Image: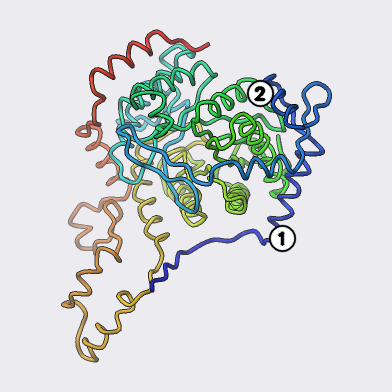
């Protein structure tokens, strides 16, 4: 018999989880939510939710429970080729880029500048080459094309530059329809796309407790088409949510679950990921911090509530608030990544985010690929069985022998010991003779190599031509 012992983190007691859950239900059933989209209002009315003053909806607790029970506990996501890439749910963690960054640290000279469509392509291509990056997002919001085309063109660029699954954002439902059409071409039809989902859409309400027309139109389209969707509010503690962590989390979860009830009312069993971005307003600077201790504590609480509800979760990894890939950046990004791994957060985005979520760094992305790899190894934990206890080997070696020549050592070496590729483990003399390279310098060298040599698997020309024709004829409004 084998036991796998994985390290875990715990923040909330069972009683605290129960009280947060009760607060969520009370906010939904008594304080209510403001819903601005007519189809969503009709769905809620028809399902027995009272509506007051035209658009304030109060959702009974049993409706929330019913929606949670109907939503799937696992969501399988496939890559462009149709191979299974992510099995979301449980404590399985996956990592990927973030989206829509206004600025980019140029990979050539490190200068901060406005993002372009080429930055979307470049980020997808780098992510395609990194083994610990499981999905891609746009990473950049292109400033060099008309805003009406930015989201759809970014989706096209991502699909062309990587085979990995996409998590997309969209201005409105017309954008999303175009992305769905592109994905249908790649998958070979709508039915095949629904059978093997290739992309996930990210939408969000507006805190406090408002659900805009565009957000709900996209949510309902995803429910109708079976597109996996994240509906994650981003309440800002001290500004658009209570400054206290428990109140911050309760409001965010209530906003998320209003979306879940609407979504499941449209289509029972449609794939939905819960979560929230628990940003914190720094009262000294008015910055929205991604890495304040209060942010991380709220994030931990949300992820533990995800296990409490047994729903797939939306999470974070690899973010920092500093402006260059320095020691602070690696500490902050590494800590967030470690927490996600230990919490079993499922779909962790924003790897490579800097500058309070405004600037992206491909150098940081490469650094964090190795950090993620080490966190994954740590999360594998300790298997305890006859082989790993090694009693026979210990007896055979006796008191005066050693384990270097034992077959057991050779057979278990790669399964037990994690080896870095960019971090330094050489002795001083070897490191000195190599020119004293730093972690950052090694990452920069690897990034240059990827940009110079890596070419993603191309889309077959027949499909590529259809996508170009379709994208050329679409313009979001």
Of the numbered discs 2 and 1, the one sitting upstream in the chain is: 1
In which quarter of the view is residue 1 placed? bottom left
Residue 88, placed above or below residue 240: below
Q: Image quarter for residue 313? A: top right
Dot 1: element? helix
The mark found on residue 212 in the picture is: 2
Say which residue appears at 62% left-offset and 59% top-offset: 11
Nearer the observer, 46 or 406 = 46
Q: Position of residue 217 (x, y in %)?
A: 60, 21
- Residue lying at the far top in this picture: please name it: 473
Q: Is residue 157 above or below residue 323?
A: above
Q: Which disc number belongs to residue 252?
A: none
Q: Residues within 10 Å of mark 1 (few under 14, many from 20)?
A: few
- Vertical relation: 468 (above or below) 73: above
In this rendering, would 185 be left or right of 204?
A: left
Helix, strand or loop for disc 2: loop
- Please name the residue that numbered disc 1 is placed on: 15
Tell me residue 392's x, y (percent).
26, 84
Nearest the camera: 291 or 30? 30
User: Going 82% across and 38% down the picture, which residue do you hit?
Assistant: 30
């Amino acid at each position: 018999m084998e036991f796998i012992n994985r390290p875990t983190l715990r923040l909330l007691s069972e009683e605290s989880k129960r009280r947060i859950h009760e607060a969520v239900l009370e906010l939904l059933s008594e304080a209510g939510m403001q819903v601005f989209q007519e189809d969503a209002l009709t769905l809620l009315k028809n399902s027995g939710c009272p509506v007051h003053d035209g658009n304030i909806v109060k959702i009974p607790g049993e409706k929330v429970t019913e929606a949670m029970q109907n939503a799937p506990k696992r969501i399988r996501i496939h890559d462009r080729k149709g191979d299974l890439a992510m099995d979301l749910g449980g404590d399985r963690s996956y990592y990927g880029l973030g989206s829509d960054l206004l600025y980019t640290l140029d990979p050539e000279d490190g200068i901060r500048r406005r993002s372009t469509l080429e930055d979307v392509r470049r980020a997808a291509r780098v992510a395609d080459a990194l083994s610990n990056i499981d999905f891609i997002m746009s990473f950049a919001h292109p400033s060099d094309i008309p805003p009406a085309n930015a989201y759809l063109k970014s989706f096209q660029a991502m699909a062309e530059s990587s085979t990995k699954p996409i998590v997309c954002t969209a201005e409105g439902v017309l954008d999303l329809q175009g992305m769905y059409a592109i994905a249908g071409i790649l998958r070979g039809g709508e039915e095949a796309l629904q059978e093997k989902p290739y992309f996930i859409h990210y939408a969000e309400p507006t805190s406090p407790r408002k659900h805009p027309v565009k957000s709900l139109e996209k949510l309902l389209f995803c429910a109708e088409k079976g597109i996996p969707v994240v509906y994650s509010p981003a309440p800002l503690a001290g500004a658009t949510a209570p400054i206290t962590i428990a109140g911050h989390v309760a409001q965010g979860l209530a906003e998320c679950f209003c979306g879940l009830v609407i979504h499941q009312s449209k289509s029972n069993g449609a794939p939905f990921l819960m979560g929230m971005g628990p940003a914190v307003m720094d009262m000294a600077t008015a910055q929205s911090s991604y890495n304040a201790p209060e942010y991380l504590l709220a994030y931990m609480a949300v992820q533990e509530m995800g296990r409490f509800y047994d729903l797939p979760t939306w999470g974070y990894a690899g973010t920092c608030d500093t402006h260059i890939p320095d020691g602070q950046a690696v500490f902050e990004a590494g800590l967030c990544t470690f927490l996600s791994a230990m919490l079993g957060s499922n779909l962790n985005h924003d790897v490579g985010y800097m500058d309070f979520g405004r600037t992206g760094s491909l150098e940081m992305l490469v650094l964090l690929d190795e950090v993620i790899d080490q966190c994954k190894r740590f999360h594998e934990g300790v298997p305890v069985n006859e082989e790993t206890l090694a009693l026979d080997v210990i007896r055979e070696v006796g008191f005066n022998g050693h384990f270097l020549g034992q077959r057991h050592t050779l057979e278990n070496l790669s399964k037990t010991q994690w080896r870095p590729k960019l971090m330094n483990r050489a002795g001083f003399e070897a490191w000195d003779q190599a020119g004293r390279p730093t972690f950052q310098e090694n990452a920069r060298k690897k990034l240059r190599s990827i940009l110079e040599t890596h070419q993603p698997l191309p889309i077959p020309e027949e499909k590529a031509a259809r996508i170009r024709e379709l994208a050329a004829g679409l313009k979001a409004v």
